[in-house]
Structure formats: structure tokens, C-alpha cells
Image (tube, rainbow, N blue to C red):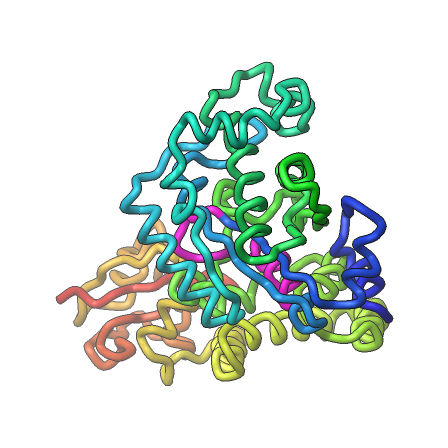
Amino acid sequence: MTLYEDLKWRGLIKDITSPDLIEKLNKGGLTFYIGTDPTADSLHVGHLSSFLISKRLKDAGHTPILLVGGGTGMIGDPKPTTERAMITKEQVNKNIEGLKKQVEKIFGFEVVNNYDWIKDINILDFLRDYGKYFNINYMLDKDIIRRRLDTGITYTEFSYMILQALDFKYLHEHKNVNLQCAGSDQWGNITAGIDLIRKSTGDEVYGFTMPLVTDSQGRKFGKSEGNALWLDKEKTSSYELYQFFLNVEDALVIDYLKIYTFLSKEEIEDLEIKNKEHPELREAHKALAREIITFLHGKEEYEKAVNLAEHLFNNKFKDLSKKDIENLFKNQDIKNVETNVNIIDLIVNLEIAKSKREAREFVQSGAISINGEKVTDINTIIDDNMFIENTYIIVKRGKKNYYIGKKEV
């Protein structure tokens, strides 16, 4: 299977700017770039698909460059519905440093910052050297611009297309870049860059877009959608990634395996058969989580995530660390609790029961466990020894309801 055929089979190509690109992709030797604006100091899973495509191209003999938009990030790519909030220069610079370190560590790509060349362009040169190549009617016909005309779009946002086209031209002339790849929402910006290069230099360059990866609700992964899964393990732990991908819908898991892993066509098709015949085993989901976490954070982090999941499944917590508990119950409401109190008071203080009477009923019926051990004695005293690492106590009611207490100091 050629590179292009593999990308198509994985559902990773939506549009290409020229059929000539197919042979060039298969042959190798292109220098290409992908871009991201520094709206945060970490990439997220929404970015990961395009960065993995870049690695696929690199492994096939192409040379990748990551452009971090220190210049364009101060403006913001137009959103379909409203203008982006401006972020400060200080935050932009902080985000750039975070992204640069992350990309170099995970992917090993060269990183460039478009602020380095945009900052020296004055307004007259911008209009004479770049603006003159852009027809307003052409710009208005771009999908993202057209969708904003009813609600209004500022000149600042309107100019973003020119700046991104300028980036393509600069990288073509200074880094021999002849291909840009991006998500399908960037088609207008890619073709604008190709037109600028053709009109100003006569050179032929190329672009292709990838379908945007969405969750089960049809929303793309991203910060603005409120469903970002960060590649920085301090923001999104390996355990959180494991739980997310282990629980994706059966209808999505095979598509995600094609997009997010380097498993072969044969391996993925084998997992697809297993997923249909024995969905309860979740072998495809486990493979998805394993491949993503191992690639991003290493085998040890993956094993740690599996270990935490097994502890939760088996309701055993005593040998966990404070950090483990914080990862397991990151989104849980953790309440401060006193020591040397009766279990009934603890249950009421953690809002597990509405009254002491109800708390007693929970304990006596065997519905309560502490740190994985069932407690049925209503006279049990919660002393210092019952707090894991002298910090946390985990109370479970029934099969799935967890409540976390933190020892008051």
C-alpha cells in the first residue's frame, strides 16, 4: 500500500489541491509544514491526528516543520460564530515555549515561530507586497469568512488569511517548503497561500486537508469546545486518557485506531472483527488506549494507567499514593474531614447521606466501604490510620458512588 493509499484508508485525507500531489507524496522528498496558534501551552487530542499524519509523512521520507503562530496567535484565526478573545503577548510567549518543548520531545520536529518574520513587516510593505495579490471578492468567497458576514467580522480577523498565506510564502522561500497540511477548516487559508506563491513567484506548491476528528456528539476535540484532552500529562493524566479511549463508543473505536495509531491495516481489521464478535472484551478500545498513551508518555505511564483502572475496578486503594488518588478522582469534589469521628458523622459530613438515620441504614445494610474494605459497624471510629498517606480517605456507597475526604490539618 502506498503512503497516499494508506492515508486514504485511514480517513486522513479530505481534499488535495492538485492530483499531482499523490505521486509526490508517494515518492517522498517534500518539505512540509503544519501550523498551530499558541492558544495554550500544550497540544490536545484534537491536534494529535494532524501531528501523527506529519510523523507518517516523515517516516515516508518527507521533512516536517511545525509553525507556532507567535504572530498570528496575537490575532486569532476567525471562528465560525464569533471573534476570538485576544490573549496577551506574555501568555503567547509562555504558550510558545510550552508547545516548542512538547513537540520537540514527542515528535522531534523542527519548530519555527512566524513572529520572527512578521514582526519586521511595516503596514505599507504588508499592503504593497502581500495585500495587492488578494482580491476582496476572492476572500469573501472563503467559507469561514462567508459564514461570519451576517454576524460581522473585524478587519483584524479578515487579515488572518493574508498572514497565513504570507507564512507559506516565507517558508517556501527560506525553508524550501512546498506543502502545507492542516484540518479541513483551513482549506481557504491553504489555497490562499498557494495562490500568493503562484502569483508572486510562479512556483507551484501544494496542500491537503484532513477531516476534523469529532467525539460522539459530533464536536471536534478542542479547548473552545470544552472537551480538550491535553497531551501534557500534568493537564490530562495518562489514566484520564486511558479511561476516555477505553470508553469511546464501539462505532468510533475503529476509526480512532486508524487515525491515532500506527497499527497496520491487518491488525486493525483483526481488532474490528474481535470488536464485533466480543464487544464486551473491549480489545479494540484497550489497543487504542495502549497505542496512544505509549506513544505520548511511554510504556511505564500506560502500565500505571492500567494499574489505577484495576484498583478502581477491584475497589482496592490502600497501596496507592496521594498522586494516584488525585489522578483517579481528579474531577471529584474532595471535602475536608476531621479525624477521630464516628463513621456516621463522616458519612453525613461527606454528604453521602442526608441524615444520621440514613447513614446508619447504609452502614448496617453493607452499602459502605472505606478504602476498599466493607464497614458494617456503626460504632467504627475514623482515626489517623485510616487515611491513605495520612491524607485521603475513600468512601464508596453501593457499586459506583465514590466520596473522597481529605484530612484536615
Total number of numbered discs in the rendering: 0
Based on the picture, tell me whether residue 53 belongs to the magenta stretch: yes
Q: Single out the residue that lies furthest toward the front.
A: 201
Residue drawn at (62%, 29%), measured in percent from left and top?
A: 144
Seen from the viewer's position, the closer of residues 367 and 212 is: 212
Residue 21: horizontal and vertical position, in percent?
79, 54
Residue 162 appears in the figure: yes
| 225 relative to 192 in the view: left or right | left
Residue 189: horizontal and vertical position, in percent?
62, 37
| 368 relative to 220 in the view: left or right | left
Residue drawn at (50%, 71%), measured in percent from left and top?
A: 106
| Residue interval drawn in magenta | 37-55
Q: Single out the residue that lies furthest toward the top.
A: 150
Splitting the image into 4 quarters, where does residue 118 fall?
A: top left
Residue drawn at (46%, 56%), measured in percent from left and top?
A: 112
Splitting the image into 4 quarters, where does residue 321 fall?
A: bottom left
Q: Where is 199 relative to 319, above or below? A: above
| 134 relative to 379 in the view: left or right | right
Splitting the image into 4 quarters, where does residue 345 fall?
A: bottom left
Q: Where is 75 relative to 255, above or below? A: above
Residue drawn at (40%, 79%), measured in percent from left and top?
A: 317
Seen from the viewer's position, the closer of residues 359 and 115 is: 115
**Can you say which quadrant of the picture contains the N terminus?**
bottom right
Q: Where is 172 relative to 269, above or below? A: above
**Can you say which quadrant of the picture contains the C terminus?**
bottom left
Residue 69: horizontal and vertical position, in percent?
45, 47
Seen from the viewer's position, the closer of residues 20 and 96 is: 20
Based on the picture, tell me whether residue 68 belongs to the magenta stretch: no
